[in-house]
Amino acid sequence: MYKKSNSKGFSLFELLVVIVIISILSGLGFIAFKTTLDRTKESLAISNLINIDEFIRTELFVINHNIIKNAPHIKTGNEKWKQEVHSLNQFISGLSSFFDIYLDPTNFLNPFQPGRVKQVYSETLQSDTSDPYYKKKGSILFRLDPDHTDHGSKTSGNRFFQMIYYEEDNIINPKYTKTYALE
């Protein structure tokens, strides 16, 4: 015979089913949140890359079209970078320093790295190449064009350099590799 129970609570089985359902839903929510967060970080890193590209194109336009001989925002030491005086290596170093020092450094922090890790590096600066984060996901790197590595010390003529973007640690995304000419 069945004995009718007068208790008005949930059985252990019912509670376990509810806990499992809540766990599954929270797990799915966490995965969706992480995916959204990663996409947001990628968008921020690419946005910084696009802004830097526009800045470089503007600087090169003024220099290459002889509008001015000094780079308006690029410094080498305490003076502005000058055409036919300073080398391409000095230009690249000054460019990296501009985003590191002369602008608000919070604008160009690597969104994929913990803490306050900068996003923009230069292969011409020893301090940058010794930084453990300089080839990490989200980093932007200025370097001499690999086909023209002899251009670094040149102070005049066509000189080529690149801006590259790391989509993963030590993996360059060729879609975002930009080559520039300093004439």
Image: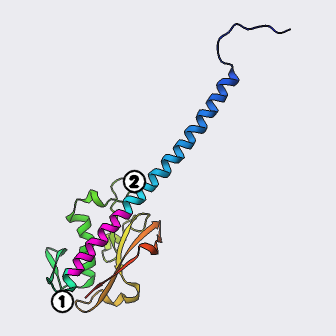
Residue on which disc 2 sits = 114
Using the rendered view, name the quadrant where residue 68 is placed: bottom left
As drawn, is 122 to the left or to the right of 155?
right
Looking at the image, is mark 2 or mark 1 earlier in the sequence? 1
Please determine whether, in this image, residue 23 is positioned above or below residue 174.
above
User: x, y percentage for residue 35?
Assistant: 50, 52
Percent across and percent down for residue 62 are 19, 80
Q: Is residue 46 above or below residue 94?
A: above
Q: Amino acid at mark 2?
A: Pro
Relative to 48, say whether 115 is above or below. above
Residue range of the region highlighted in magenta in the rendering = 46-61
Left/right of residue 76 with respect to residue 52 in the rendered view: left
Crowd class of label 2 (few under 14; some 14 to 19; many from 20; radius 10 Å): few
Image quadrant containing the C terminus:
bottom left
Q: Relative to the observer, which residue lies in front, 67 or 127?
A: 67
| Image coordinates for residue 159, horizontal then vertical, percent | 29, 88
Few, some or many residues within 10 Å of mark 1 (<14, 14–19, 20+): few
Give SS at disc 1: loop
Q: Residue at x 24, y 80 (%)?
A: 60
Look at mark 1 in the image and give the residue it sits on.
Answer: 84
Q: Residue furthest bottom?
A: 157
The reply to whether residue 159 is in sight is: yes
Task: Using the numbered discs, state the Cα–Cα distance from disc 2 to disc 1 in whole angstroms.
Answer: 41 Å
Name the residue rendered at 52%, 43% in the picture: 30
